[in-house]
């Protein structure tokens, strides 16, 4: 009989809850971003998902997608969250890319407003839920009624969600708030704002920030000297007009005032992503423990030795298996010509006495070489990838970004023309690669059908 003290289920549950809350007391952060893609979501999804994964973004808000409601969209490493098809605005459209390791705690809110998509990130322990919005607001050229209605709807939603949790608003808000005029605005906007006179949308957005207590992260972070494009301007600008060459800050990441002190950070990535808007990013507190899954194991090669196994007792299968085994034996004989066990000496291992490490390694290499030559191999455990997003497309993207960097430095008409040429080349190449990839897939389907290969079908 065990003499160990018994622990009640209630005490164990309370101890587990206390340990979880203690773990969540530490600042747990996620990387969020926002980008206006200018209608390039379908053709440039490979570039966007590759860049977001490379920089480790957990949540990316996308605006001006211009997606047809019936278009199916998938992103490697991310869950795509869109509005319902019946309320999607065909001219613009917004969505979220949520990393797979975080998607388990994310749900879409039932919002019926076009170009304003809300999602809920469920909190753990005593942490409040976080509500994120990807928003695309009307431009200054829209009517006063349209602009006022859109910002009032955003305000109502933000206030309702702020009453039960934390709020994060991201997107192209088309608002020039400019600098603060009083102490309250200075607390919300910060010191590093775009200079100038506030426009109509700017006043509407400022009202939203005041009544919902939302803080703009851009103005609270001084652009470092390592980012000369922003340091020279004195503020984080997010869009450069291709004609007038003027820069403005119209993209925002707004967070609840209570989150501003949790080690938040802000930046603008001035890498060209085939849009006249820049990717804005921030590091904010997260209400749940973020567990990033380890990457898959490294790809390995599997030798197709099953060709040496007799499939049936038929004469053809018996003959095929014997020929495969004979070929393998012949390749082994060629591969092990000159092999002398014990002749290799190792001076880098930690073995004591007679060492056979090099001999075993040589034996394995010769065996694998014979198996590859006779039976062949396939790569297993490789990660999912888009076959059309190959090295040629990546090189075209690199050339386009280089041309964009030249334009950003010089601002000349010739540089802008060259950048547009590179951008059109990328779009045409992506379309061609997708078309060729689909044709190849159809040919494989047809071949599998003609050969009656049920496994491939």
Image (spheres, grey):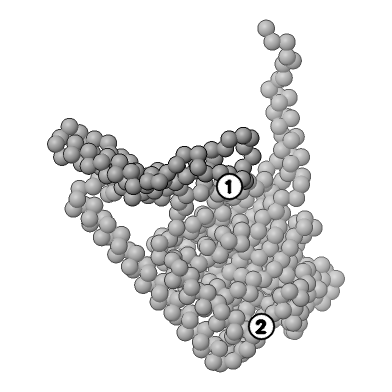
Q: Residue furthest right?
A: 183
Sequence-first disc among 1 and 2: 2
- Residue 247: which numbered mark, if any? 2
In the image, residue 437 sits, relative to residue 109, either above or below, namely: below
**Image point 45% across, 42% down: which residue?**
340
The answer to whether residue 46 is left or right of residue 252 is left
Q: Residue at x 75, y 78 (%)?
A: 231
Q: Where is residue 327 in the image (x, y as percent from the top left)?
A: 27, 44
> Can residue 152 be seen in the rendering of this structure?
no
Q: Is mark 1 on a helix, strand or loop?
A: loop
Residue furthest left in the image: 315
In which quadrant of the rendered image does the N terminus lie? top right
Determine the CA span between mark 1 and mark 2: 40 Å
Secondary structure under the numbered disc 2 in the rendered image: strand
Q: Name the residue under label 1.
A: 294
When the figure is inspected, residue 275 is found, relative to residue 171, above or below; the finding is below
Q: Residue furthest top?
A: 1
Q: Are marks 1 and 2 in contact (CB under 8 Å)?
A: no
The residue drawn where x is 37% and y is 46% is 337
Q: Position of residue 132 (x, y in %)?
A: 63, 58
Q: Where is residue 72 in the image (x, y as percent from the top left)?
A: 41, 60
Q: Nearer the viewer, mark 1 or mark 2?
A: 1
* Residue appearing at x 37%, y 67% in the figure: 434
> Could you say which disc has been placed on residue 2 in the image?
none
**Residue positioned most to the bottom:** 413
- The answer to whether residue 181 is visible is yes
Q: Quadrant of residue 401?
A: bottom right
User: Would you call the spot at circle 2 few (<14 residues within 10 Å), some (14-19), or many (20 or more)?
Assistant: some
Choose between 368 and 294: the one closer to the eye: 368
Q: Residues within 10 Å of mark 1 (few under 14, many from 20)?
A: few
């Amino acid at each position: 009989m065990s003499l160990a003290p018994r622990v009640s289920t209630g005490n164990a549950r309370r101890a587990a809850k206390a340990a979880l809350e203690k773990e969540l007391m530490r600042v747990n952060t996620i990387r969020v971003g926002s980008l206006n893609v200018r209608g390039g979501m379908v053709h440039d999804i490979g570039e966007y998902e590759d860049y977001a994964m490379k920089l480790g973004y957990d949540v990316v808000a996308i605006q001006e997608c211009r997606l047809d409601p019936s278009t199916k969209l998938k992103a490697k490493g991310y869950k795509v969250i869109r509005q319902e098809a019946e309320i999607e605005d065909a001219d613009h459209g917004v969505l979220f890319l949520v990393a797979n390791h975080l998607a388990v705690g994310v749900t879409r809110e039932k919002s019926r407003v076009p170009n304003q998509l809300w999602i809920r990130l469920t909190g753990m322990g005593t942490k409040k839920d976080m509500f994120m919005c990807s928003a695309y607001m009307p431009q200054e050229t829209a009517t006063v009624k349209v602009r006022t209605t859109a910002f009032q709807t955003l305000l109502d939603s933000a206030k309702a969600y702020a009453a039960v949790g934390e709020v994060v608003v991201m997107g192209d808000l088309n608002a020039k708030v400019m600098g603060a005029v009083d102490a309250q605005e200075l607390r919300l906007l910060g010191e590093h704002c775009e200079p100038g006179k506030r426009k109509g949308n700017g006043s509407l957005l400022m009202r939203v920030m005041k009544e919902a207590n939302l803080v703009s992260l851009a103005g609270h972070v001084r652009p470092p000297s390592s980012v000369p494009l922003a340091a020279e301007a004195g503020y984080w600008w997010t869009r450069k007009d291709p004609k007038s060459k003027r820069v403005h800050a119209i993209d925002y990441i707004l967070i609840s005032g209570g989150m501003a002190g949790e080690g938040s950070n802000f930046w603008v990535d001035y890498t060209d992503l085939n849009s006249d808007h820049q990717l804005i990013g921030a590091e904010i507190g997260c209400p749940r423990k973020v567990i990033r899954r380890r990457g898959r194991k490294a790809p390995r090669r599997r030798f197709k030795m099953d060709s040496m196994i007799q499939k049936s007792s038929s004469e053809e299968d018996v003959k095929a298996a014997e020929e495969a085994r004979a070929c393998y034996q012949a390749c082994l004989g060629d591969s092990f010509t000159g092999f002398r066990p014990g002749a290799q000496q190792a001076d880098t291992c930690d073995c004591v006495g007679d060492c056979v490490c090099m001999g075993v390694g040589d034996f394995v290499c010769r065996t694998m070489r014979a198996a590859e030559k006779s039976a062949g191999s396939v790569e297993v455990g490789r990660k999912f990838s888009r076959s059309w997003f190959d090295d040629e497309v990546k090189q075209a993207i690199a050339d386009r970004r280089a041309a964009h960097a030249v334009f950003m430095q010089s601002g000349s008409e010739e540089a802008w023309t060259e950048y547009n040429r590179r951008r059109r080349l990328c779009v045409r190449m992506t379309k061609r690669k997708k078309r060729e990839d689909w044709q190849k897939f159809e040919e494989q389907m047809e071949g599998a059908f003609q050969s009656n290969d049920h496994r491939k079908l």
